[in-house]
């Protein structure tokens, strides 16, 4: 059973925005879009830039350093130079509170 951790109130993360948090020792970016709320590792798999400093375009998260892009729904790479998907994390909203269960680190 995943361990959910309360992160912030839904109203504190307007649609179209993202914020970074440290959850269970991992740097996570939470993105709020029309399609829902998603959580991914905040560090680009290409060059270790902080993705929260990049751009969120619908469900595309663009790295500020070299422009690699990822699908926030499943972490897959949408554009180079990244070739490795971002780890994603389970999100739920309970009583107007965004909660995240951090996935185990990939092997």
Image (tube, grey):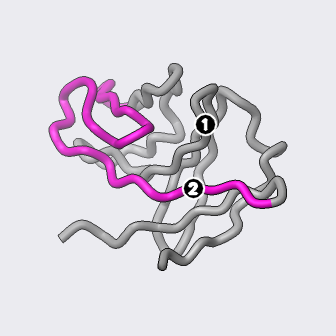
When asked about the image quadrant of residue 69, the answer is: top left
Q: Is residue 58 magenta?
A: no
Tell which of 85 and 73 is nearer to you: 73
Task: Please state the extent of the stretch shown in magenta in the rendering.
Answer: 65-94
Quarter of the figure with residue 15: top right
Residue holding disc 1: 36
Mark 1 vs mark 2: which is more N-terminal?
Answer: 1
Q: Position of residue 73 (x, y in %)?
A: 43, 38
Say few, some or many: other residues with alpha carbon within 10 Å of mark 2 (under 14 / 14 to 19 / 20 or more).
many
Figure check: 16 above or below 73? above
Residue 85, x across and y down, in percent? 25, 44
Q: Of all residues shown, which one is farthest toward the top?
A: 57
* Cα gap from disc 1 to disc 2, whole angstroms: 10 Å
Q: Is residue 4 left or right of residue 97?
A: left
Q: Secondary structure at mark 1?
A: strand
Q: Is residue 77 magenta?
A: yes
Q: Residues within 10 Å of mark 1 (few under 14, many from 20)?
A: few
Quadrant placement of the C terminus: bottom left
Could you tell me if the residues under marks 1 and 2 are in contact, i.e. CB atoms within 8 Å?
A: yes
Please name the residue that numbered disc 2 is placed on: 91
Q: Residue at x 41, y 27 (%)?
A: 62
Q: Secondary structure at mark 2?
A: strand
In the image, 49 versus 68, the foreground residue is 68
Q: Residue at x 40, y 53 (%)?
A: 88
Q: Is residue 106 above or below residue 24?
A: above
Q: Percent position (x, y) of residue 20? A: 59, 51
């Amino acid at each position: 059973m995943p361990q959910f951790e309360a992160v912030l109130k839904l109203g504190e993360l307007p649609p179209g925005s993202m914020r970074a948090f440290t959850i269970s020792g991992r740097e996570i970016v939470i993105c709020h879009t029309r399609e829902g709320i998603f959580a991914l590792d905040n560090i680009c798999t290409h060059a270790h830039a902080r993705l929260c400093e990049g751009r969120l375009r619908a469900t595309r998260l663009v790295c500020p350093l070299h422009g690699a892009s990822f699908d926030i729904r499943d972490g897959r790479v949408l554009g180079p130079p990244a070739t490795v998907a971002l780890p994603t994390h389970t999100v739920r909203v309970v009583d107007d509170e965004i909660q995240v269960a951090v996935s185990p680190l990939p092997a």
